[in-house]
């Protein structure tokens, strides 16, 4: 059985609340390991237009983890320049419990493993992932978004330690 680890190759964004179902963003294939310069491109080309469109009143929140490319000086500076447009949530160290994408990768991986014919190259793998992603139910995404308050409470209660998530 092939081993799939996809999280480093993709980017996605979602809106919360009433705008969620109408404005979910597709998965964006990256195709290479991410460095700060490439991430800056994603932030400026995808995050910025999404956030300013979805949250014209500048009341949106952007979530990212502590990956080195996310914490680079050029990224921090970019977010400081745009801090009047949306808020970047502070991410606790060593706490993947707050990231709903991990649960979505589990869904994608289960579906990949269930395929009758497994991808044999990167192009087939990308096509399979995009197809699976497009077919994840809106209810699945909504459930993950709605679970965020519970996740945050659990992390706070565990003082940043392990939770059921």
Image (tube, rainbow, N blue to C red):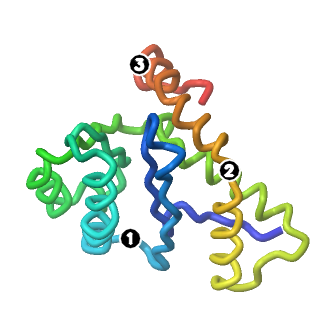
Residue 134 drawn above or below residue 120: above
Judge the density around disc 2: few (<14), some (14-19), many (≥20) Cα neighbours within 10 Å: few
The alpha-carbon separation of the residues under discs 2 and 3 comes to: 24 Å
Q: Residue at x 54, y 48 (%)?
A: 101
Quarter of the N terminus within the rendering: bottom right
Q: Residue at x 54, y 60 (%)?
A: 7
Q: Which mark is residue 102?
A: none
Q: In x, y percent, where is residue 28?
A: 48, 69
Please name whichever residue, 133 or 89, is drawn nearer the observer in this view of the structure.
133
Q: In x, y percent, where is residue 24?
A: 50, 53
Q: In x, y percent, where is residue 81?
A: 9, 55
- Upstream in the sequence, badge 3 or badge 1? 1
Residue of label 1: 34
Q: Taking 84 as reference, is 162 left or right? A: right
- Upstream in the sequence, badge 1 or badge 2? 1
Residue of label 2: 106
SS for tag 3?
helix
Residue of label 3: 156
Quarter of the C terminus within the rendering: top right
Q: In x, y percent, where is residue 26?
A: 52, 63
């Amino acid at each position: 059985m092939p081993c799939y680890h996809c999280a480093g190759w993709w980017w996605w964004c979602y809106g919360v609340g009433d705008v969620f179902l109408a404005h979910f963003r597709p998965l964006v294939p990256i195709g290479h390991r991410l460095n700060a310069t490439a991430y800056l491109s994603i932030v400026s080309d995808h995050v910025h237009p999404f956030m300013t469109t979805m949250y014209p009143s500048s009341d949106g929140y952007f979530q990212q983890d502590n990956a080195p490319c996310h914490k680079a000086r050029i990224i921090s500076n970019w977010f400081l320049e745009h801090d009047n447009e949306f808020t970047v949530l502070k991410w606790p160290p060593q706490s993947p419990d707050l990231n709903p994408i991990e649960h979505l990768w589990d869904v994608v991986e289960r579906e990949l493993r269930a395929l009758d014919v497994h991808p044999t190259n990167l192009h087939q793998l990308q096509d399979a992932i995009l197809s699976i992603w497009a077919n994840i139910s809106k209810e699945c995404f909504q459930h993950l978004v709605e679970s965020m308050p519970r996740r945050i409470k659990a992390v706070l209660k565990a003082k940043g330690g392990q939770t059921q998530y």
